Image (tube, rainbow, N blue to C red):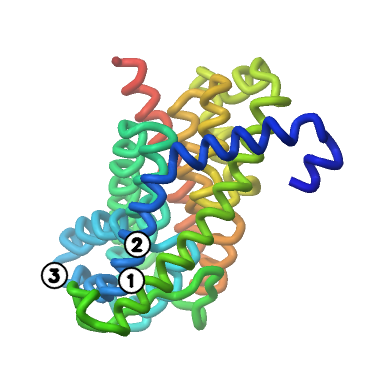
Amino acid sequence: MLAIALIAPQQLPASLAFTGESLLGIAPWLALSVAVAAYAKASKADALIASVFVGSPARMIVMGSFFGALSPFCSCGVVPVIAGLLGAGVPLAGVMAFWMSSPLMDPEMFGIIAASLGLEFAIVKTLAAVALGAFGGIITHVFVSRGLVGQALRSGPASCCPPAAAGARPDWNIFANSAARSAFVAGAASNGWFLLRWMVIAFLLESLMVAYLPAEKVVSLLGNNAGAIPLAVLLGVPSYLNSYAAVPLVRGLMDLGMNPAVALAFLIGGAVTSIPAATAVWALVRPRVFALYIGMALFGALGAGYAYSALLAFR
């Protein structure tokens, strides 16, 4: 806000009004999302994760993909969980399925996307998260079975988000336990403040994009041309901030004419391959596993973008 006031003071009132209206519109979804995420952590529901990775490789891959899309982990916060699973000897294929789908969707993200980009887009992104997880798990299983990938862990985990609790028995009635109630309040306050900060920054940036970014330039680069999907995936690597800040910015670009399929490719590619997430992954696993992870993420983002583009064209 200070930068806007100094550089473009005439724009500040419009940006503040835009941000206030946008926050007001998304407030119910934001509050519900924060409450769901806080409950999941306070009840220690994430302790159920380890029970997913049992049985045949096919079962582990399917369950890991679905559970990853439902888990409340960011792309960096999931790293300690992955380290624990790999350290406990869970097969890499099942872990990879969970790993690739988890950063793409969670209860908070579903609510924010549904409020900002529409319920259809939220459902499509959820399906893409599950599909990418299954794809990653299958490819990893093939590589491991053929001896192309061996030991996964390099050393201890690195994380840019607080690690989630694991290994405890879930306590669904959190309000009967003072410690769980305190954890719920603390989690809601922490998540709410985190999201509010990023959403304010994102809406301010969106207001500047609406005011100054030429619509014809957006349409020419990231418009209705399916060839823009690879560009969107590549741009997601250096420019992706985080999942929450990206949504309002993508909404602004879509308002300027960006194809929804291009937006999906950007959100998927950026969430899995952004520099903070890639750094955390590099610190955790060996180079061959890291290269497999990045390659599958980029290929999966392209596939999701083109599949959604075909669906939109068919309709």
Circle 2 packing at 10 Å, graded few (<14), some (14-19), many (20+), is many
Using the image, tell me which numbered label, if any, was put on residue 41: 1
Relative to residue 63, is residue 259 depicted above or below?
Answer: above
> Mark 1 to mark 2: distance in Å?
6 Å
Q: Which residue is drawn at 73% across and 25% down?
A: 212
The residue at which mark 3 appears reads as: 55
Which of the pair 5/82 is nearer the observer?
5
Residue 3 appears anywhere in the view: yes
Q: Which residue is drawn at 51% across and 18% down?
A: 224
Q: Is residue 139 left or right of residue 256?
A: left
Q: Which residue is drawn at 32% across and 34% down?
A: 119
Relative image position of residue 274 (x, y in whole percent): 57, 53
Q: Circle 3 — which element?
A: loop
Observer-side mark, 3 or 2, equals 2
> Mark 3 to mark 2: distance in Å?
28 Å
Q: Circle 1 — which element?
A: helix
Q: Is residue 61 left or right of residue 206?
A: left
Circle 1 packing at 10 Å, graded few (<14), some (14-19), many (20+), is many
Q: Is residue 18 left or right of residue 121?
A: right
Q: Report the amino acid beneath label 2.
A: Ala
Q: Earlier in the sequence, mark 3 or mark 2?
A: 2
Which of the pair 255/33 is nearer the observer?
33
Relative image position of residue 153 (x, y in whole percent): 45, 77
Relative image position of residue 73 (x, y in whole percent): 40, 63
Which of the pair 275/28 is nearer the observer?
28
Using the image, tell me which numbered label, if any, was put on residue 37: 2
Q: Which of marks 3 and 1 is nearer the N terminus?
A: 1
